[in-house]
């Protein structure tokens, strides 16, 4: 059985064991009835920073390699993700798959 929460009971307008029933009535000017409004619905959207056709992938890099990618991105005024994509594109091209566009264009 759930425990009695006096604060929650007051907010819901129910009398609690520590509160007399008369205090919960709307006739008491000190008690304001709780009005619950439905939250506005937001349109569904893709995850932050991802397009509809992209998937998040986690890679584990040695700390010095990750730091080098961040450093290169900083000096090129780019994001590290851009460098990762460039590296993946180069690898796919080297393997004869036509890079990222060659794979996604199929």
Image (cartoon, helix red, strand yellow):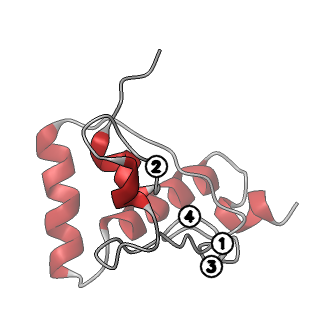
Labels 4, 2: front one: 2
Farthest residue toward the bottom? 77
Lower position in the chain sequence, tag 1 or tag 3: 3
Labels 4, 3: front one: 3
Q: Image point 36% across, 23% down: which residue?
A: 3
- Residue 40 numbered tag: 3
Determine whether 18 is above or below 27 in the image: above
Q: Are marks 1 and 4 in contact (CB under 8 Å)?
A: no
Residue 29 in the image: x percent, y percent?
33, 79
Labels 1, 3: front one: 3
Q: Are marks 2 and 1 in contact (CB under 8 Å)?
A: no
Q: CA distance from mark 2 to mark 1?
A: 39 Å
Helix, strand or loop status at disc 4: loop
Mark 2 Cα shell of 10 Å, populated few (<14), some (14-19), many (≥20)? some
Lower position in the chain sequence, tag 3 or tag 2: 2
- Residue 14 numbered tag: 2
Question: In the rendered view, does 23 fall on the left or right side of 68?
Answer: right
Question: In the rendered view, does 26 fall on the left or right side of 31?
Answer: right
Please give the residue where the numbered disc 1 appears in the rendered image.
Answer: 45
Q: CA distance from mark 4 to mark 3?
A: 19 Å
Q: Are marks 4 and 2 in contact (CB under 8 Å)?
A: no
Which quarter of the figure has residue 68?
A: bottom left
- Closer to us: 34 or 19: 19
Residue 90 in the image: x percent, y percent?
52, 58
Please give the residue where the numbered disc 4 appears in the rendered image.
Answer: 47
Q: How many marks?
A: 4
Q: Are marks 4 and 3 in contact (CB under 8 Å)?
A: no
Farthest residue toward the top? 1
Quadrant containing the C terminus in the rendered view:
bottom right
Q: Image point 56% across, 64% down: which residue?
A: 47
């Amino acid at each position: 059985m759930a425990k009695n929460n006096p604060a929650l009971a007051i907010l819901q307008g129910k009398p609690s064991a520590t509160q007399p029933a008369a205090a919960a009535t709307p006739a008491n000017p000190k008690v304001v009835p709780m009005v619950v409004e439905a939250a506005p619905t937001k349109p569904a959207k893709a995850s932050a920073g991802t397009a509809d056709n992209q998937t998040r992938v986690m890679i584990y890099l040695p700390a010095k390699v990750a730091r080098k990618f961040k450093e290169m991105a900083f000096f090129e005024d780019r994001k590290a993700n851009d460098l990762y994509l460039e590296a993946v594109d180069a690898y796919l091209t080297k393997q004869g798959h036509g890079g990222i566009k060659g794979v996604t264009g199929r």
